[in-house]
Amino acid sequence: MAVARYTLTELSRRRILLVFLIVGAAGLLLLGGGLRLIYQYQSSNPASLGPNSPATPADLNRLLELLFVSYLFGALGIFSEVIAFAIGMTAIYHDLDSGAAIGMFSKPVTRAAFAVGKIAAALIALVVIVGVLAVEARIVMALFGGGLEDALTGQVLAVVANTIVVMLIVLALTTWMNNIVAAVVAFIYYNVVTTVISALHTLTQQGVINNDAIKFVFSVAYWIIPHELTSSAVGDLVRAEMKVSTAAGSSQALSAIPPASGLGDIAWWAFVVVVFAGLVYYSVRRRQV
Amino acid sequence: MYSRGWFMVQSVLSVRDLRKRYRRSDPWAVDGVSFEVPAGQAFGLLGPNGAGKSTIVKIIAGLLRADAGSVSLFGSNPGDPAARARLGFAPEDPDFPKYLRAPELLDYFASLLGLDAADRGRRIPETLAFAGLQGEKRQVRHYSKGMKQRLGIAQAILGRPELLILDEPTADLDPLGRRDVRALIERLKQSGVAILLNSHLLSEVELVCDTVAIMAKGKVLKEGTMPEVVPQGKTLEDVFVELVEAAGAKREDVPSFIDERPSAQ
């Protein structure tokens, strides 16, 4: 408990996290406020509506809200990952690098308790920061009349779940190597290696690649990488856009959107989290200071 | 346990044939070191830089793993948290979570020591006062080396240890701070606390230690009580220099260019 409490105190005083929070919050306000201003202007000047504009100001309002939400989903993903990296790179590494861990590990605290405290603090910090941004996003959405709150909630949960995995990978790596190198390795592993393996696995499943050896390799590789959780939010968003936009996409576009993760995916995510949390513990336990 | 005259004295710390190297290709940092520290006595571990002193104290504190040999800390392995609860360790060049303030840091470490709220409320202000940090509002990252050293000693005594390891405790302290540390060691010894002092300041070691071991290149060259190690008419420094130089750890002479005088232009 003490490790988690004082790690949180430290994280709350790190300017870099505060800067990310302020930039994220200001970005959301500017985006939502800007789109709202466009709506105010267009609705007070109906003559300015173009031939491809929605039929009514209410439809325009809805379209701008959808635009805001689609940008929001992208921004939340990026911000969550950046914050996960910022927390993962510092929560354990600073104690090891500065020598502060010497004082802690000579106290009667087990390495397991230390690792659990650090992971708990990192998770709480990530959830709180992303949660604050999500609450703000929900308030901005209310300015447009709302209607996609459930999609936002689902997307936030998926984003947080995915970034927890990245953060645990970074936390584990920072006990072995420099934190910048750890971040680069984690980024390549999570954003490049897993994407390539997932894509090739999909191709083998769809029969595009028929070689049995390659199929076997990617079937195995697919189950040693984390699988990104997806919510139904993107699909909900596209369906809502198709309802209001005169330039809406076809149902083919809708079918290309990956479905929301099911129970099996969530169980695999939980397993991956346990494995990486275990790796953090193992790394801390093996670490000599 | 070890014998002294007719008595068997209980050691709080027993180190046996300890060996450690950091990489297979490296020479042994610690090479077959053995010693015991009984309760209420101060044991001085002396040696030049790189002699292996800090490696030994880190193994005792459970921070490093030995390659061979054993350490018995209150009869247990240093990995046992119950044994470490009775240990206080002030590391050389101490550092701390840098965004915390001194009272928060001591509260953090007191929590790790398992002290209850009442004990924390009583001990933390007194320890801060001892360290001269009672009014300090800044975060640790703004502290000078001397302030960090005082905080390092403060966190080491917070749990009222039965064995206190001080690794170069006065290196960054001013003369007043050094005097305070000497007085602290005397008080702790009187109350039965064992001290393991690792220091370059031989005059200080001579003042406070009952027993010393002089090391070089990972080995103990000489060990015994102060009168056994330092014969009449010699100082600890004389003995130290003789032993260390005989062990081949002599430093190079002063560079030749030091004697050159600037030529008049």
Image (tube, coloured by chain):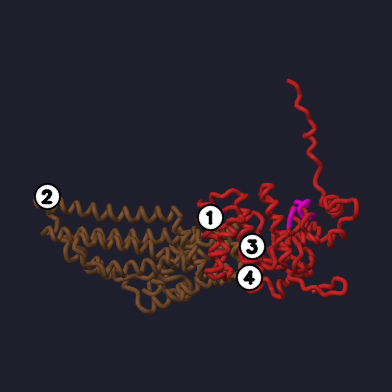
Q: CA distance from mark 3 to mark 4?
A: 11 Å
Observer-nearest residue: A76 or B100?
Answer: B100
Secondary structure, mark 3, is: helix
Tell whether label 3 touches label 1 (CB within 8 Å): no
> The chain drawn red is chain what?
B
Give residue B85's mark: 4
Magenta residues, start to end: B198-206
Q: Earlier in the sequence, mark 1 or mark 3?
A: 1
Secondary structure, mark 1, is: loop
Outermost residue, left side: A47
Check if residue B203 falls in the magenta segment: yes
Q: CA distance from mark 1 to mark 4?
A: 24 Å
Q: Select label 2 or label 1 by which is in front.
A: 1
Q: Quadrant of residue A114?
A: bottom right
**What colour denotes chain A?**
brown
Tell whether label 3 touches label 2 (CB within 8 Å): no
Name the residue carrying label 2: A48
Residue kind at label 3, given as amino acid type: Ile
Q: Mark yes or no: residue A2 visible.
A: yes
Residue kind at label 2, given as amino acid type: Ser
Q: Is residue B149 left or right of residue A46?
A: right
Observer-nearest residue: A282 or B95?
Answer: B95
